[in-house]
Image: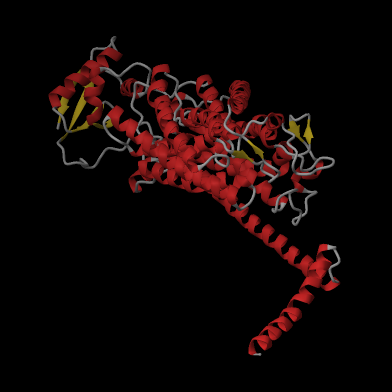
Amino acid sequence: MRTMRFLGCHLLVWLILFVPTSSALAQESTGQLQPESEGKLAELQKGIDEAKVKGDTAWMLVSSGLVMLMVPGLALFYGGMVRRKNVLATMMQSMVALAVVGVYWVAVGYCLAFGESHGGLFGWSSRLLFLAGVQPDELLLNTNMPIYVHVMFQGMFAIITPALISGAVAERIRFAPYCLFILLWVTLVYCPLAHWVWGMNWFGPGATGKDMVGWLGKLGALDFAGGTVVHIAAGMSGLAACLLLRKRLGYPEHAMHPNSMVLTLTGAGLLWFGWFGFNGGSAAGSGALAASAFAATQAAAAAAALSWLVVEWLHRGKPTALGLASGLVAGLVAVTPGSGYIYPWGGLVIGLGAGVVCYISVAMVKPALGYDDSLDAFGVHGVGGFLGAVLAGVFCFKAVNDAGADGFVVDGSMGQVVKQVIGAVVALVYAFGSSLVLIKLLDMCMGFAAKPEAETEGLDQTEHGETGFDLGPALEQATIINGVEPRPAKKPPNGDKRFSVVVAGVENGELMHSWSELCQPSEEPPSPEFMAVYPYVTTVQGNRFRFRGGEPEVLRANLERLLQKDLPKLSLRARVEP
């Protein structure tokens, strides 16, 4: 009896709970929800959509900030590798892109790169000019972020790309032609390439945000975050510049030591940090694709830094800080085109290969061919970008376009590799050829390269009238005094014996002119007499050379022979005075 009563109670509870539920399910299956249920579902879906917009927008804003941070990171990276007299000028060449390209991108650049496509060659949508026709809450089609965010994110790419080129011609170009160059280069090279590779049907008639409209994108060449658009383009343009413009004075005979590996390592660290936004943000939202790009980026950077160090250690006997910094950047460059399409283990393989290949390009090929790629913009970005673009076709597993449209499976077949090679070669030829013409025209009209005397004095002073490193009051006073005759040292800085050598038989002006000419860098190696004298000279006043350290008679004899060779018509005599 108890059992029957127990079963009866359960049956009653089941009827109470199940019957209304089953009725609701039946209504749902036939599309007959109650009005209040429909309202709740609509409200729930609206909340989900708003959360997606907020989440993706937050990630893309962070990514944009990370890419912007790469610009001062690049300035430090490049600034530490040049001589002290050029550190400020070199950093300015990176930082000024934030101003020049930053304004241009909002005004016109975004319209040219991402506007309605015209034959797959360039974009143009009048409402994108100055973003005058875009509302703050208007979302980019098929994404969860406002158009403004996409403009800012892509704008950071347009800013840093021409700044990369400056590394190829650092320490020998003028600032004004460079500013005009980056403006024209973004217009004629970067914006078309960006449209060819990343242009989609966002603003044209019947816009869906899904259809590729750039001709390289239609071809199927993969470039997740800028291997062709950014790195191959910048590297090849840098090669064109360093081949067309003259070499630095004294290169390669004279050693040109970096002024601060501390700055370079700090800059490399900021580049590594910012690159997570560079690649992760190219997923156009948060999620698995961004996570995949993030992981592959980290793996490639670490692997390339390690492989560069090991090869350098074996080749030169010591692992250097410059090698570590250059290696990690090479890995970041190489993984960029395929970062969202490969597994982390593919990033490791690409990074290991990039470290070795880029080291060979910088340490062996460049000296053999003799071109003056000042800070290895071509050796790292051009070579690394091309390698990464091709390897993206080998290791990719799935490609999903930036707007989040339906993906197409790629198996790393030879057909995809061929597409990658085509895309890379197109970017290489177009950027190199366009840059040759552009640089030649600017050099003819304005004089792109600095004058030899300006390069000798240092671009910090001649181009900007400033000093990168203020080392104290002595340096400040020295800029006020006429620079022809440096101030005499009041006491030997290292406690060595101090003495003078007085030269007779020549006018002071002629002697100073001769000494100044001897101190200028040249393609010919300095004479043995000059190398014997120069390290010990502190100041020259009139016909008196002040020395610290060294053997007085040996230095006197070498100085006399040196000046006599340069002034053979005169009869010179030199004597030592305390």
User: Which quarter of the image is occupied by the C terminus?
Assistant: top left
Residue 434 horizontal side relative to residue 124, left or right: left
Image coordinates of residue 511 in percent, x first then y, are: 31, 21
Q: How many marks?
A: 0
- Residue lying at 67% horizontally and 58% vertically, measured from the top left: 52
Front residue of 201/538: it is 201
Instruction: Determine the image quadrant of residue 59.
Output: bottom right
- The figure's colour scheme reads secondary structure
- Does any portion of residue 88 appear in the rendered image? no
Instruction: Determine the image quadrant of residue 135.
Output: bottom right
Front residue of 29/425: it is 29
- Residue lying at 21% horizontally and 18% vertically, measured from the top left: 560
Residue 20 horizontal side relative to residue 152, left or right: right
Front residue of 454/78: it is 78
Q: Is residue 197 above or below residue 569?
A: below
Image coordinates of residue 323 in percent, x first then y, are: 37, 35
Image coordinates of residue 400 in percent, x first then y, are: 65, 41
Front residue of 318/282: it is 282
> Which residue is outermost to the front?
1
> Which residue is outermost to the bottom?
1
Q: Is residue 176 above or below residue 575?
A: below
Residue 226 horizontal side relative to residue 37, left or right: left
User: Which quarter of the image is occupied by the N terminus?
Assistant: bottom right
Image coordinates of residue 170 in percent, x first then y, are: 47, 31
- Does any portion of residue 374 appear in the rendered image? yes
- Residue lying at 46% horizontally and 26% vertically, measured from the top left: 373
Residue 422 horizontal side relative to residue 307, left or right: right
Instruction: Determine the image quadrant of residue 525.
Output: top left
